[in-house]
Image: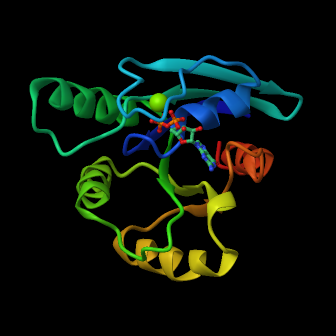
């Protein structure tokens, strides 16, 4: 099995941290400052079971300035080129989708690609708060899979990789 997957999501949710954890290399710059990833970075993970190329993209904003518009385009174009989209959000005890994420999901609907909901930073919240959050997101979009992870603590990342492969 093999294929391409894109990491799509708002700035700072941990897309680059996830890519680095998946590949075991510091390919993508991780920063608490949003917008650190301006261009696309490709990380290839090869295991006996298969190979997946992950595209890290700049986060999608509601486009205001020129640069933001550019980053939205880069991210959506990446989503258009892959077999599978990993839509990344961060765990929060605020149970809401938010305008930024809603805009992304609307764009992703149009592409019609199989899309996972990847909930990152689960190390920062009690497990129970994930349930209403998952419920809410599943009402917004027909996700193929929902996968809670902590990219930083390497929790659920292997499971995510296996699930990605199983869809290829
Ligand atoms: P990106 O903009 O989506 O690529 O986000 P980054 O990977 O640059 O990460 C943004 C910030 O979130 C950095 O300070 C990371 O260390 C932090 N971060 C990423 N993943 C996790 C995680 O699983 N748990 C926690 N607590 N922090 C994380
Ligand atoms: Mg990044």
| 13 shown above or below 23 | below
Residue visible at 39% across and 36% down in the picture: 79
Q: Quadrant of the N terminus?
A: top right
Q: Position of residue 122 (x, y in %)?
A: 65, 61
Q: Is residue 118 left or right of residue 85?
A: right
Q: Position of residue 155 (x, y in %)?
A: 77, 52
Q: Position of residue 123 (x, y in %)?
A: 69, 59
Residue visible at 51% across and 27% down in the picture: 55
Q: Residue 18 sits in which quadrant?
A: top right
Q: Residue 71 sits in which quadrant?
A: top left
Q: Is residue 52 visible?
A: no
Residue visible at 43% across and 19% down in the picture: 40
Q: Quadrant of the C terminus?
A: top right
Q: Nearer the viewer, residue 27 or 126?
A: 126
| 26 shown above or below 115 | above
Q: Nearer the viewer, residue 145 or 120?
A: 120
The residue furthest left is 65
Q: Is residue 104 left or right of residue 31?
A: left
The image quadrant in which ligand 1 is located? top right
Q: Is residue 66 visible?
A: yes
| 21 shown above or below 157 | above
Q: Position of residue 118 (x, y in %)?
A: 56, 55
**What color scheme is it?**
rainbow
């Amino acid at each position: 099995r093999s294929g391409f997957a894109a990491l799509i999501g708002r700035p700072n949710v941990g897309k680059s941290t996830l890519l680095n954890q998946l590949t075991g290399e510091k390919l993508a710059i991780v920063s608490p400052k949003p917008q650190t990833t301006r261009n696309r970075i490709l990380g290839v993970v090869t295991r006996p079971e298969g190979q997946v190329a992950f595209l890290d993209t700049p986060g999608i904003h509601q486009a205001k300035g020129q640069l933001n518009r550019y980053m939205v385009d880069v991210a959506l174009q990446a989503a258009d080129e892959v077999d599978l989209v990993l839509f990344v959000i961060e765990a929060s005890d605020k149970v809401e989708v938010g305008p930024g994420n809603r805009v992304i999901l609307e764009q992703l609907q149009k592409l019609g690609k199989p899309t996972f909901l990847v909930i990152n930073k689960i190390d920062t919240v009690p497990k129970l708060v994930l349930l209403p959050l998952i419920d809410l997101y599943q009402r917004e979009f027909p996700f193929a899979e929902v996968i809670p992870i902590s990219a930083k603590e390497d929790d659920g990342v292997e499971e995510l990789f296996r699930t990605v492969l199983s869809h290829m």
